[in-house]
Image (cartoon, rainbow, N blue to C red):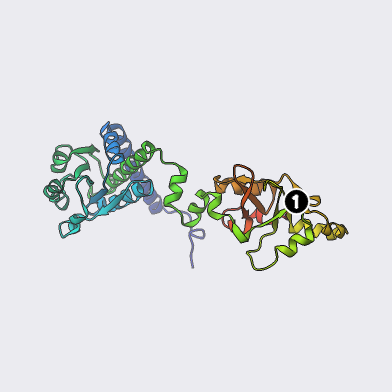
Amino acid sequence: MATLASSPLMTESDTEALRFVRTVLRVEAEALERVRERLDGAIVRVAELVLHCKGSVIVTGMGKAGLVGQKLAATLASTGTRAFPMHPAEAVHGDLGRIRHGDIVLALSQSGETEEVVRLIPALRRLGATLVAITERPTSLLGRQADLSIILGPIEEACPLGLAPSASTTALMAVGDALALLVARLRDFRAEDFALYHPAGSLGRKLARVEDLMRTGKHIRLAHRDESIRAVFVRLGGARRRTGAIMVIDDEERLVGVFTDADLARLFENHRENLLDEPISNAMSRDPVKVVVGCGVVEAVDALKRRKISELPVVDRGGRPVGLIDLTDLIGLVPADVLEHEDAA
């Protein structure tokens, strides 16, 4: 089977095709630049309107503009705005029941004359929704009827026929992103807020806090510094999620050290089995690396990587252990070279 890598050098027709592709991108980039220059304070006023909306933001549009609207609604939702897409054709067949007084309807229409969109206007007025248009011309029907409009100005499509929405949908998409991100900026939307709305997948885990992933309760091992090593291992036996570190505490329950399975192995390797019946503090690693509850998982991963360790205690503000981050819980977040090290706690 032929592959791109095994294809012959480009022919003259290939060169022409590549030139065409680059022209499309140039036309769209130039259109975006012209829209950027035309934008005025209206987009800021719309952002403030969305920021202070007590209801929902409903995004509607027909055809390609409707698809862009779905993306805009999703971006608004993921950055803290209660937003939903609504198909204008479905709206007049009952979906207008989703709209309440105080909602904002963002209507996307390049021409501002899209029949399915403009026929919503009377109903939106009766329902008490605020209508915001993102459109090409302020003199269009949608532009005239809207409470507030973001005007894009005339846009030349990249399509050679001037028909297929291309540069116009790129502009709609970019302006929608700019609006959503401005709202997020005005809201002071932060990484921890983003994590709240993105708990799944690797992105959610990277944005999570250590308390979201750390082991707690019976799945962590604690020992007083005066307990013997043998007594600790006997006491901590039984069913529990396996971890290779024992966190050692003092009389005030503050973390003073860590004793790992690697430390135990070294006792036997160095013929120091006599220490098994001595206080665990005699063989523990003192002043261990730790993180404070509330810090990000990324910070924990960085500590594991820098120190080449497999377990990381999590302590409260008073230095008392409340959990443990184990390397095996971070598979997918930790670089491969960290997984290959030997425990050096």
Residue at image mark 1: 225
The image quadrant of residue 177 is top left
Residue in front for this viewpoint, 124 or 236: 236
Measuring 72% from the left and 53% from the top, which residue is drawn there? 224
* x and y, in percent, of residue 80 in the image: 37, 46
Q: Is residue 46 left or right of residue 248?
A: left
Q: Is residue 214 left or right of residue 56?
A: right
* x and y, in percent, of residue 181 in the image: 37, 41
Residue in front for this viewpoint, 273 or 173: 273
Measuring 26% from the left and 46% from the top, which residue is drawn there? 55
Q: Is residue 184 left or right of residue 247?
A: left
The amino acid on which the numbered mark 1 sits, given as a three-letter code, is: Arg
- Of helix, strand and loop, which one carries label 1? loop
User: How many residues crowd around disc 1 within 10 Å: few (fewer than 14), some, or many (20 or more)?
Assistant: many
* x and y, in percent, of residue 110 in the image: 22, 45
Residue 164 seen in the figure: no
Measuring 20% from the left and 37% from the top, which residue is drawn there? 148
